[in-house]
Image (cartoon, helix red, strand yellow):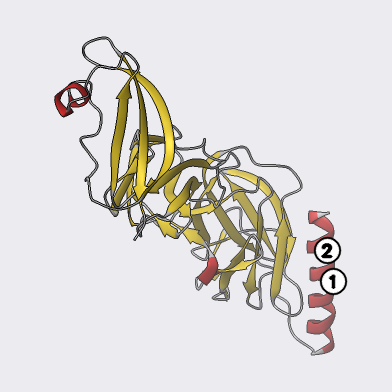
Amino acid sequence: MKAEYYKNFALILLGGLMAAGCNLVNITASNPISTGVTVNGVSAPAVSLVVNTFQNLPQSQWITDSSNVAYTSTSTLMFGGTCSRGIAAVDIYIGGTLAGTSPCGFSGTFSWTNTSTTGDGTYTVRVTPVAGDQKEYTGADWSQSITVDTVAPAAPIITSPTATVTNSSAVTIAGTVSSTNTFKIVSSVPPTSASFSYPGFSDNFTMTPEETTTFTFYAQSRAGLTSPGTSITICYLASAVLSAFDTTGAAITTSVLDSNGSGKMFSSISSTPYLMSTEPMISSDSHLLITGFYNYVY
């Protein structure tokens, strides 16, 4: 197929030159042609090659990092661009190996799709223009580092808070990720990007009184793949009190409740309460207590 491209190009070029009455000079060189130099008394053309599409996206939409490495989540690579007069085709090298050839059409454009898949990893892609005699030009190559990443990150792990009820409007949710290809952590409700430095992330939210919200976090790779979500539901009780009675009939004191780590985080106010939840617990004197969180409505 590659030879056929060059044959057609040569025949068309030969016919045009003969019709114009040109004296043909055969350029033969054992080495690749360098643009702008003289070979056998004839100056090789100064060709121009531009690659402006990758995965069918214009260059302005390529996903790149600070080192200008382009990322894709697809193992089938596609490139396209423009080629000047004098270029019959372009050779595409992936990681130093010739992966294919694409003809440069009369419109001055080329488009190439790899017929085989490229495994995950980072490669240098080089596109080299080729003359009609199947010799590559030097000095007009285009190259680009790319990373193929077809695996989505694992779901993030939320490490705090451990409690799902809070009396503070300011909520910080933190966690970790295990996948090294994680680029950022996003939350769907509300839509936001968490502060992230591998492997940890954190995000701050402001809740309103009596609000109950489920926060879901996702890990995303630079190639654009998204992990399954990890969720936590948090309830903000602006004012509540812990009420309890001892099943033995013994008096309940604040010290008994507090010694077992209960009731400290809520403010007690005077109002008409309604029962939010009940939970049996053992006090510091080993008595069974029945407790309940009461939320106060204004």
Residue 163 image offset from top left, x and y in percent: 35, 35
* Residue at mark 1: 11
Position above or below: 6 against 100: below
Position above or below: 73 against 26: above
Residue 83 image offset from top left, x and y in percent: 64, 73
Crowding at dot 2, Cα within 10 Å, few <14 / some 14-19 / many 20+, comes out as some
Q: Residue at x 81, y 62 (%)?
A: 5
Furthest-top residue in this view:
286
Q: Residue at x 42, y 31 (%)?
A: 278
Q: Quadrant of the N terminus?
A: bottom right
Query: 90 or 70, which lies in front?
Result: 70
Q: Residue at x 76, y 73 (%)?
A: 105
* Residue at mark 2: 7
Q: Residue at x 74, y 80 (%)?
A: 107
Q: Which mark is residue 235?
A: none
**Relative to 19, is 143 on the left or the right?**
left
Residue 281 image offset from top left, x and y in percent: 35, 19
Position above or below: 42 against 223: below
Position above or below: 237 against 190: above
Q: From mark 2 to mark 1, how far is it between C-alphas? A: 6 Å
Q: Secondary structure at mark 1?
A: helix
